[in-house]
Amino acid sequence: MSVVSPIREHLVTGGKTYHDVTEDICRHVEAKPTKEWKVAFAISVLVLLYGGSWVLWTWWEGLGVWGLNKTVGWAWDITNFVWWVGIGHAGTLISAILLLFRQKWRTSINRAAEAMTIFAVLCAASFILMHMGRPWLAYWALPFPNTFGSLWVNFNSPLVWDVFAISTYFSVSCLFWFIGLIPDLATIRDRATGVRKSIYGALSLGWTGGAKTWARYEDVSLILAGLSTPLVLSVHTIVSMDFATSVIPGWHTTIFPPYFVAGAIFSGFAMVQNLMLVTRVVYKLEDYITLEHISLMNKIITVTGSIVGVAYITEFFIAAYSGVEYEKYAFFNRAAGPLWWSYLAMMTCNVLSPQIFWFKSMRENIVVSFVIAVVVNIGMWFERFVIIVTSLHRDYLPSSWTYFTPRMGDIGDYLFSFGFFFTCFLLFSKFLPVINMAEVKSVLKSSSEKNSKQ
Amino acid sequence: MADKKYLVGIFNDEDVVMDAVQKIRSKGIKIHEVFCPYPVHGLDHVLGYERPRMGVPAFLFGITGTSLAFLLTFWTLGIDWPMNIGGKNFFPFPTNIPIVFELTVLLAAFGMAFTFFFMEGLGPSVKPLIFDVRSTDDKFAMAIDLNKNTISDSEISSFLKEVGAEEVNVKEV
Amino acid sequence: MAHKHEIPSLDESFDFSPALRKKLIISAIIGVAMVALGAFLLNNHMSIGVWSSGHGAEHGAADAHANGEHHGATLFSRIIGNIWMNSVYFLGISVVGVFFLSYNYVAKAGWYTSFKRVPEALPSFIIVPAIIMLGLFLVPSSREVIFHWAHHGVMDPASENYDKIIAGKSWYLNFGFFLVRMVSYFAIWYYLWTQIRKYSLLEDENNDIYFYNKSRSYAKMFLIFFAVTSSTAAWDFSMSIDTHWFSTMFGWYHLASWHVAGLATIMLTILLLKDHGYLKSVNFSAIHDLGKLMFGFSIFWAYVWFSQYLLIFYANLPEETIYFRERLSGYDGRYFAPFIINIVLNFVFPFLILMARESKRNMIFLKLACGSILMGHWFDFYQMQMPGIAKDQGGIGIIEWGTTLTFASMFIYFVANQLSKANLVAKNHPFLEESLHHEI
């Protein structure tokens, strides 16, 4: 059996037995919703309805309800899209890459992170539909020959790559998430009665947990992780190529693919941190999501934040070094132009603020962790805003230089995505186990302070 | 259909069950299956199962995805309706890689997953044979098909206890 | 217990025999002789080699006589280019030793502990490329050959060699600053390695977590320093050769190349030591994991390479595409073959060889993959640097083989010497038990 060094921190505290794990997690699925849950759900649905009405208005009235102008043709819509896709990276990353690296601490957080991925990708996709203006023609992005003959979509276009990448990512993430859920659904099925039993029974596909099934299941999970890891990278790579294949200064830069991926992991972990900190308190899961977990996530946030910082410096350096005056101006304008405040927000939130986690006491401070995670997500939103808007608003033609001011349509549609995201997440946390019970049990023996009965 | 009779040994701990499997198998008793609440590393090995090779379907489906994607992009943009895009070739190799990659992963993942469901007989309308409901909670249930073993029931039963089973139940189906 | 491990003795010391020392010294000398022979032959319009080498000898030499002043590349450029290229390549492999240790220390990894003395030995070689590179940089004639920006008068508006774009980079590419950067990379990388090494060796004598924590804090310092200097070093040592050209990806691409070459070196060293009966406690799970890293980072390298290529190909900006144009069809197409071989050896072969689980546990397949990766990244650095240095004089022949042989011999000498200085297993490392019982 594997040996765990005594100097490692325990991943599950409180001397839990296998049965305690089942009880602690299933309790929330089986019990009636709590008051906190109901209040949170009501607020989310209200925000969803309010934002949804703005989305409908956007489609009814047209994109004129946004603050776009003839110079800045992409602003909040694509900023929000990239932001949500970025957030949607951490789930599959935690499951896939951390599984490949055999990081046992992933077991407590992967389920919620994967759920978050799926909802975040849906939010991102909603902005693609919104910015089409005529969402009923969205199928034009798919490879159907058009009505006049057989003119196909342009497979050379990064926007078409995006369609393939996001839909593949969404489907594979759902699959990965669902496969992870099967054993836990069976656990719930075996505890449930009546209609619930048949619903969870159908969802669990008749799982019994035989050793042969488990062996194949583990092989499937590992290969899915192996497939998902390059998939995660490819998705944000392709998103970055929406910009980088162009010849706009500030967009066309070769570091974009890995830099976007690092940024995505960064903001995704921050969002997981936020959600887990809340879930942990509301569901009393302090023994499963320990300070060690929080501290490890903070470390990843610091590392990815610093990688993003290196990329910022690289971009700036190369702009100065290149000798291309447009390139130089684009970066000068970012830092010192009329949108300097967004650049400042990006730099401080993304590069400076996570450095606080070099101190152990800060890493293990729940309030600080929560606040920094929020700050990081604000910073990452500004990063996309900086890339998109500051590169566009002063383009090659100085006579069309302009400024960008959002209008209520931008804000309302953004609110819609929050409403949607939290509504989905709350439904998930009510009806499905928020922690992967089977995986936690599999590390319980080696990683808990008191081994289960022996 | 009470013609099948199983002895179900209930264990508490993964190491005990692992040890028990080895002892029982070395005694020549055939084990139907061991049901566990979580994957126990190496249990399939001591039960004498072959190493799972789910990579094979993944690879085959992946290759299929690669070929289909190449065919799609090559036929549409190279043959059916060639377009001049950015002065590049009609079928520029580098720009097709993203789509080829995505479809490879898509088919590999779904192909492998559905192969797995098919191999294990998993599906929404499947009514599973559950030997002990606690095996999805905290117990390890070892099922021994009595029809396939020549040793007497009571002997197997007492041996199960001897190797660490907490209780031994009879299950008829 | 289902799996019992026989743990072999942890006291092992590598015997760097005088016979081996002698062999390595002789092969280093042979390498130098090969370069001399190659140079002599080329001067007499003959050559031993493949691809454009022979071709280059006839046309290139004739060209050099006819309009040598214009191209500015001579046989001397080719030799200097070779030395610079191999220095950068082996420097990278050595530094990756500390890099590998550092990220494993910082991540509190346990699996690699049983072979950690191998990456720990690699950085001892840093001083050799450091001295060679400083020498090449300090001597004006070789500096001018390597770096376009160091050409005489290139930054002087009054000179006929004046180049406005390069002059615009003088704030970064100037003798003083460049020298300071070079010295600080070498000095700090080497110093931080000596510290990590020192505490690791002290740990062998005293079983105390203090030494682990000490190594770990130096590992953190190294990672912070290397995060920036891995990119700046790439700009300095490789990108500034083609002074006009720039790519933001280049730093990470260069690092990816170094990193995977370093991993292959670590793997190959382990396998060779195992062949000779050392490192018995390194089990196949650890080797399997290292194989996965090689596999993964080969793909990562290909990803970075492809992203850079695709974006430049797509946008088609002349100041960027010139870089690939030179390699694909420039100088009579002499760099086309290395360019393609680079992708095949670094991505296609390792991908196919290492995909299956069994091959990551098979000594022969692993050695094949290591060979492919090590040769492949040699070609990577070749195609990064030679078109800018040797220009129309480039080729692959006895000169290249000789230079590489000398460098490889010196590298093996240093690493073997360092390995012989300490116990081959870090016996008091707090994660050693995890590594010895590592099972996947």
Image (spheres, coloured by chain):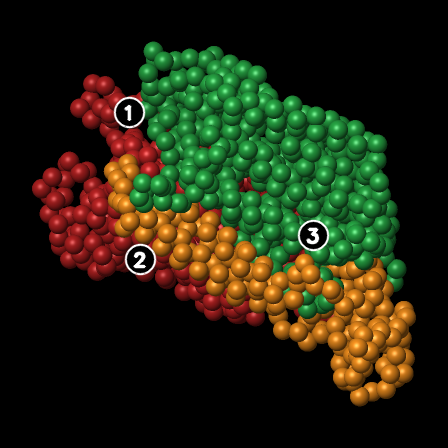
Between marks 1 and 2 in the image, the one whose residue lies nearer the viewer:
1
Q: Amino acid at mark 2?
A: Trp
Q: Is residue A101 visible?
A: no
Image-based side of A131 in relation to A44, left or right: left
Toward the front, the furthest residue is: A147
Toward the bottom, the furthest residue is: B150
Chain drawn red, letter? C
Q: Residues within 10 Å of mark 1 (few under 14, many from 20)?
A: some
Q: Amino acid at mark 3?
A: Leu
Q: Quadrant of residue C324?
A: top left
Q: Position of residue A2 (x, y in %)?
A: 72, 61
The residue where tag 1 is placed is C165
Q: CA distance from mark 2 to mark 3?
A: 56 Å
- Between A192 and B169, the one lying in front of the other is A192
Between marks 3 and 1 in the image, the one whose residue lies nearer the viewer:
3
Image-based side of A97 in relation to C313, left or right: right
Q: Position of residue A390 (x, y in %)?
A: 45, 20
Chain drawn orange, letter? B
Q: Are marks 3 and 1 on the same chain?
A: no
Q: Residues within 10 Å of mark 3 (few under 14, many from 20)?
A: many
The residue where tag 2 is placed is C401
Q: Position of residue C287 (x, y in %)?
A: 57, 62
The residue where tag 3 is placed is A181
At a point 26% along the width and 49% down the height, the residue shown is C335
At a point 44% along the width and 56% down the height, the residue shown is B65
Image-based side of B125 in relation to A38, left or right: left
Which element is circle 2 on? helix
| Image hue for chain A | green
Image quadrant holding the N terminus of chain C, namely bottom right
Q: Is residue A52 visible?
A: yes
Q: CA distance from mark 1 to mark 2?
A: 36 Å
